Image (cartoon, rainbow, N blue to C red):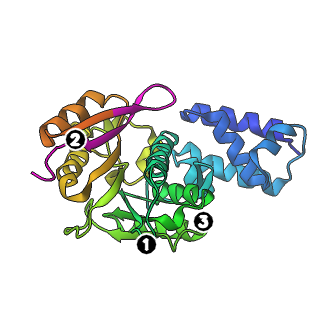
Amino acid sequence: MANVAQLLQQGVDRLRAAGSETPRLDAELLLARAIGVDRTVVLAHPEAPVNTSSEAAFNADLDRRAAGEPVAYIRGFKEFFGLALAADPRALIPRPETERLVELAEQEVLQRLTRAPRPVRTSPLRIVDVGTGGGAVAIALAVALRRRRMLDEVSILGTDISPDALALAQENAVGHGVADHVRFLEADLLPPVIATPFDVVLANLPYVRTDAMPGLPIAASFEPSLALDGGPLGLSLIGSLLDRLPEALTHGGTALLEIGGDQAEGIAQLAAERLPDWQCQVETDLAGQPRVARVERREGGRAAA
């Protein structure tokens, strides 16, 4: 009977040969899944024997990963912002870098809710997560605000053009107990008519350049291309959203838009062209890379074009 260390090394060797970018991490996660324990247990007990049924399950998962299938789809979930979110081919797998968008969103909401006393019966702060996919950003923000006992002070809407993605988002909202506070709507970016503008617009829209799509890791081929392809410059959908901001945002509202690490100049130029009376500031992530564009009207700027 093989032990944990032996199977782990076999898995690492096989995934490395198959071209995995993170063969050891992948093998650790898949072996933990096969055994039915947390990854930390695998790391702490390399000498532990593994029964034949668990070994067979591990090898089956290795087959799937060696063929390129993402570990998150094999496991059926992805950790994001401290949450385990269901993940499957209906939506893009949440990326660690998107956690920066949630952090900035939480900071923005906290500032708006605490900078001045809110009168009794004040309408909830209106937030929209555009291109919500599996709901990662909207749900992570809702859970964070629930911990602060502020969830009742906001209204969160998630929009997406894919009904399949929205179904996954709803499942995730139910799983994390925020389905009564996060609403999902099928829409192309935003509803055609916006009766009441939003205070905060969030978006993690596709920003991969079309010509870069073939060069993505093979795992990305298992994800919906609709959630990755951002057009010739990677900013097509983001540009379309910028066009909607004058009607979508309240006069003092803020849009936080995730971008690629090489798109700081591109988003600044695009915002200047589409919204000349507005300002665009790029926030960096923990690695110091451009990650989120903060777009707001300049003081005294026009409410709409």
List the residue tagged with mark 2. 299
Residue numbers of the magenta segment = 282-305
Instruction: Report the mark closest to the observer, 3 or 1.
Output: 1
Q: Nearer the N terminus, badge 3 or badge 1?
A: 1
Name the residue rendered at 80%, 38% in the picture.
43
The answer to whether 203 appears left or right of 18 in the picture is left
Figure quadrant of residue 175? bottom right
List the residue tagged with mark 3. 176
Question: In 3D space, how far apart are the residues under numbered discs 1 and 2 (Cα atoms)?
Answer: 28 Å
List the residue tagged with mark 1. 121
Question: In 3D space, how far apart are the residues under numbered discs 3 and 2 (Cα atoms)?
Answer: 39 Å
- The percent position of residue 82, horizontal first and vertical second, equals 63, 50
Q: Nearer the N terminus, badge 1 or badge 2?
A: 1
The one nearer the camera, 37 or 278, is 278
Q: Residues within 10 Å of mark 3 (few under 14, many from 20)?
A: some
Regarding mark 2 in the picture, which secondary structure is present there?
Answer: loop
Figure quadrant of residue 289? top left
